[in-house]
Amino acid sequence: MKPNHSRRVVLASTSPRRQELIASLHIPYEIRPSYADEHTPSDWTPRQIVEGLALRKAQAVYEEIGDPSENAVIVGSDTIVVLEDQVLGKPADDADAFRMLKSLQGRAHHVYTGVACIDAATGQRMVRHRMTRVVMKPLSDATIQAYVQSGEPRDKAGAYGIQGLGSTLVEGIEGCYFTVVGLPVSLLSDMLSEFGIDVL
């Protein structure tokens, strides 16, 4: 049976990493930046944060393009790093990045990524998440500083990118690698199939 690629995906994200992962699925897609507010209540769980923000991002784009004639599915995604009970988002500056990496080095943490899909024609929605455990190597201050100076940590949750230079900091993972990158493609493909988009 031939895959159904008549519907397109609208990615509600400006993340180059998420764009690359969507492109790798070889389905029609377009990018629509989502300017949704990313503040969340302090008592939300990691699951509530990533699912809530993923849905908020997708909803913001749905409100722009939602139309009964739109043959598209809007996809929003959000990623956070959790060390014990502390949620680490994107660092405010290089000093904040250094602080985050110092706290993560030599320890295990969890990365949560939420994915939301909204049918642009009907408003039907689905929200899920995945979690991956990551162990970071023990790192010297000089190594952390060199990584911070590379500029890579600036726009990344937890101040590292596992798909870039940050891969040299990671000892091992348990779970989906793409959850750590920022878009669990296995989960997304399952969700898209519920909306009539079969990747394979």
Image (cartoon, rainbow, N blue to C red):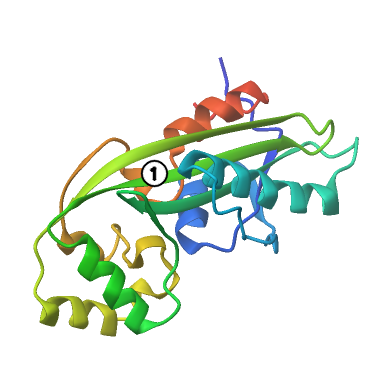
Residue for point 57% across, 28% down: 191
Q: Is residue 165 visible?
A: no
Q: Which residue lies at the image location 90% right of the left edge and 37% below the top edge?
A: 69
Query: Number of callouts in the render?
Result: 1
Residue at horizontal 52 percent and vertical 25 percent from the top: 190
What residue is shown at x 71% (from left), y 35% (from top)? 7
The furthest residue to the top: 1
Is residue 2 at least partly visible in the picture?
yes
- Percent position of residue 120, x then y: 79, 39
Q: Given the image, on which type of amino acid does mark 1 rest?
A: Thr
In this picture, residue 73 sits left or right of residue 25: right
Relative horizontal placement of residue 71, taking residue 168 as reference (left or right): right
State left or right for residue 165 relative to residue 8: left
Q: Quadrant of residue 119?
A: top right
Q: Is residue 197 above or below residue 101?
A: above
Rendered-image quadrant of the N terminus: top right
Q: Position of residue 30 (x, y in %)?
A: 66, 53
Q: Residues within 10 Å of mark 1 (few under 14, many from 20)?
A: many
Q: Between residues 100 and 143, which one lies in front from this camera angle?
A: 100
> Which type of secondary structure does the marked residue at label 1 adopt?
helix
Percent x, y of residue 115: 55, 40
**Residue 158 location in percent, x, y?**
35, 62
Whether residue 122 is situated above or below residue 44 in the rendered picture: above
The residue singled out by tag 1 in the image is 179
